[in-house]
Amino acid sequence: MTVFILVAGAFTGPYVWRDTAARLTAEGAEVHTVALTGLGRKSAGPAAAIDLETHIADVLAVIDPLVAGEGRDIVLVGHDYGIHPVLGAADRRAGAVTRIVHLDSGMPQDGVPALAAVPDQQLREELARGGGGPALPPPARDAWPRWGSTAGLSEAALDGLTALAAPQPLNTLLQPLRLTGAVAAVPVTGVLCTGNGPGIEMVQLMVDLGEPALQPLTDPRVTFFELPTGHWPMLSCPTELAGILIDAAAGGGHRLKAPGTPAHLRPFLLDVPERPRERTGNTDLYLPEGPGPHPAVVFVHGGPVPAEARPTPRDWPTLTGYAGYVAGHGAVAATLDHRLHAVTDYARAAEDVAAAVERVRADPRVDADRVALWFFSGGGPLTADWLAAPPAWLRCLAANYPILAPLPNWGVVDARFHPVRAVAGAGKLPIVLVRAGREMAEIAATVAEFLTEAERCGADVEVVDVPEGRHGFETLDRTDEAREAVHRAVAAVLARLTA
């Protein structure tokens, strides 16, 4: 028999599992919902005495009586904060646990407190200073999005979530998780709620970029499922969640590919003759024939990209391919590396881009009054500065499969980096947007939002569609359709530079 032990997240208790547990039971499983001290279970002592170790003990108290039973597969499910006591308990009973399910939760590491996973940076800093007393009050009805997307929740479900929420003992968030490493032997399933964060395709992309912390996810014992909902799937789609948990217990799910040749390092889809380039600091220049001055296109890579990733983005085939192609058509092309290593790095990445642009414009072979900026993927938020107040020398702004609004799992991001809001200031600035038809849903939603706002404010946007193209199609899709899209996009940008 499969035994599910369900552990709820911050502010919540066993009640959130009611419908999912009922479905699991109907399918023949045994289900236990853990009442964590101070949340689902009353504490005899003060809230200050409740910490992560208290909650680990609560989970162990459910596991231990089950271990004596024969023929039981114990599956621990941790939602949100609940993954921390789940991992702590599984580390001490690794031989008894068949699988751990991370339900829209992070990947806690030894020595790291649950506070690190709180999405709101300002709140993290406040709590780290001990603000708020021994327990954190539960969110008001309109404040739940600070803790996760409420997409999919009915009004009644949101009312119930608010009415039954309990204060979260602060020390449960501040005490570091301690792991011996035994838990690493337990198979794992991640359930990704795409209304609240990345889906499987984006996780694979981050693995391919070489993020060290994500490499264990390519272990064949690790599987993934997606749910198109927000952060509380047990309330928004309990039946679907139950089905996924049953499949997970049986070892089902998608497995990530270990990086061979990552998608972003495969050859560019066009055969572009190699051109000489000049490297100065973080910037490379590709020069056309003739003395100039020539118009220039500055290519800005996406991310976040791990700081230790090699080669660095300016040597990736997509950027070198576009740069060589543009230089072959009479414009100076520039590629650069910037410091977007995490979603909190947009401000310093913007500084790097602005400095590189000024270096390019200062080069005597460049016509400083005819410059285009071309952004890719996660570099999309960096367009906001240029959209909000375009300088006279900026003749065109282009973006390929861009993220044009903060994604749900980013937490609170500086409002400055929100292109949907910034496009109202674009005025007559020509914008060329290359859209992948098979884009990740979470990114496609930001593009649709941007285009709606651009139309409302009368922005000058030309869309180049690649109907069967994927995110990063230049190294993924060697099709005539994809090649034609590159030709069209480059021609559109160069036409605006020379107009």
Image: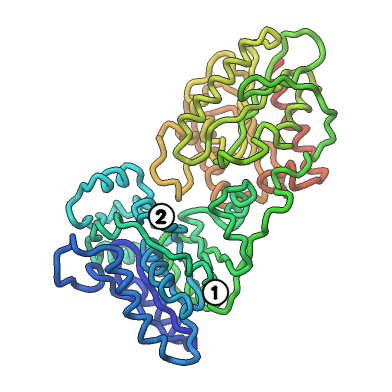
Element at label 2:
loop
The residue identified by callout 2 is 149
Residue 414 bears which disc, if any?
Answer: none
Q: Position of residue 326 (x, y in %)?
A: 76, 25
Residue at the front extreme, as displayed: 180
Residue at the bottom extreme, as displayed: 70
Give the residue displayed 50% in from the left and 36% down from the top.
453
Q: Tell me: 84 left or right of 336.
A: left
Element at label 1:
helix
Of labels 2 and 1, the one closer to you? 1
Give the residue displayed 64% in from the left and 37% down from the top.
400
Q: Gap between marks 2 and 1, in whole Å?
A: 23 Å
Tell me if residue 95 comes above or below residue 458 in the rendering. below
Mark 1 belongs to which amino acid?
A: Ala
Tell me if residue 170 comes above or below residue 391 in the rendering. below
Query: How many other residues sit within 10 Å of disc 1, few (<14), some (14-19) or many (≥20)?
Result: many
Query: How many other residues sit within 10 Å of disc 2, few (<14), some (14-19) or many (≥20)?
Result: many
Give the residue displayed 30% in from the left and 43% down from the top.
125
Tell me if residue 266 comes above or below residue 194 in the rendering. above
The residue identified by callout 1 is 248
- Tell me whether circle 2 and circle 1 mark residues in contact (CB < 8 Å): no
Q: Position of residue 238 (x, y in %)?
A: 44, 72
Residue at the left extreme, as displayed: 45
Give the residue displayed 61% in from the left and 64% down from the top.
219
Q: Position of residue 446 (x, y in %)?
A: 53, 44
User: Is residue 192 in sight in this rendering?
Assistant: yes
Which image quadrant for residue 320?
top right
Decide which of tag 2 and tag 1 comes sooner along the chain.
Answer: 2
User: Is residue 495 in sight in this rendering?
Assistant: no
